[in-house]
């Protein structure tokens, strides 16, 4: 799942950067994700949606990694800390590979990010 996500993000990001004509060959993955997130609102929503889907599928580490990428590419942990009334270090630890977020903290973060993007993610049965 994580490999597929990285390839998809890179392909989509390259398209965005080519349009802007700013794609250096040495750009690292995080810079690429950040550049794409800044120019494409649908990409930001897609990152948020992928994160939530990973959580719902029991892939906690993938969900945390994608959510961490989203936060780093958009508002950053300092700004997220202000709006959630938590320390930036706590949020970073919560979304780290070894982090073990409590459900209430995780859902508070997701709720704020949905509001920030102007979306409301919903769960539907795939029957």
Image (cartoon, grey):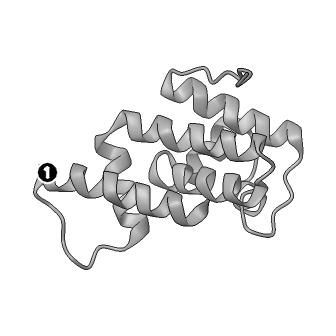
Q: The N terminus lies in which quarter of the figure? A: bottom right
Residue 59 horizontal side relative to residue 82, left or right: right
Q: Residue lying farthest left?
A: 21
Total marks in image = 1
Does residue 92 appear left or right of residue 28 in this picture? right
Vertical relation: 120 (above or below) 22: above
Q: Which residue is mark 1?
A: 20
- Give left or right: position of 32 versus 80: left
Give the secondary structure at mark 1: helix
Q: Residues within 10 Å of mark 1 (few under 14, many from 20)?
A: few
Quarter of the picture containing the C terminus is: top right
| Camera-nearest residue between 56 and 39 | 56
The image quarter in which residue 66 lies: bottom right
User: Which percent across, then down, holds residue 64?
Assistant: 69, 55
Q: Position of residue 5 (x, y in %)?
A: 51, 57
x, y percent for residue 113: 59, 34
Q: Could you tell me residue 36's position as x and y percent?
A: 33, 50
Residue occupying the point 34% across, 62% down: 32
Image-quadrant location for residue 51: top right
Closest to the observer: 108 or 9? 9
User: Can I make out residue 90 in this image?
Assistant: no
Q: Nearer the viewer, residue 82 or 2?
A: 2
Q: Residue at x 78, y 35 (%)?
A: 107
Q: Please, which residue is most extreme toward the front here? A: 127
Is 43 located above or below residue 126 in the figure? below
Q: Is residue 107 visible?
A: yes
Q: Residue at x 45, y 40 (%)?
A: 44
């Amino acid at each position: 799942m994580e490999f597929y996500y990285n390839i998809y993000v890179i392909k989509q990001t390259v398209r965005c950067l080519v349009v802007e004509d700013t794609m250096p060959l040495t750009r690292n993955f995080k810079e690429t994700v950040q550049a794409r997130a800044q120019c494409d609102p649908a990409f930001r929503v897609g990152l948020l949606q992928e994160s939530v889907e990973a959580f719902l599928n029991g892939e906690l580490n993938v969900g945390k990694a994608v959510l961490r990428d989203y936060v780093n590419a958009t508002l950053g942990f300092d700004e997220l800390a202000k709006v959630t009334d938590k320390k930036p270090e706590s949020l970073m630890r919560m979304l780290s590979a070894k982090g073990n977020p409590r459900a209430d903290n995780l859902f508070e973060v997701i709720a704020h990010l949905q509001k920030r993007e102007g979306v409301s993610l919903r769960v539907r049965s795939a029957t």
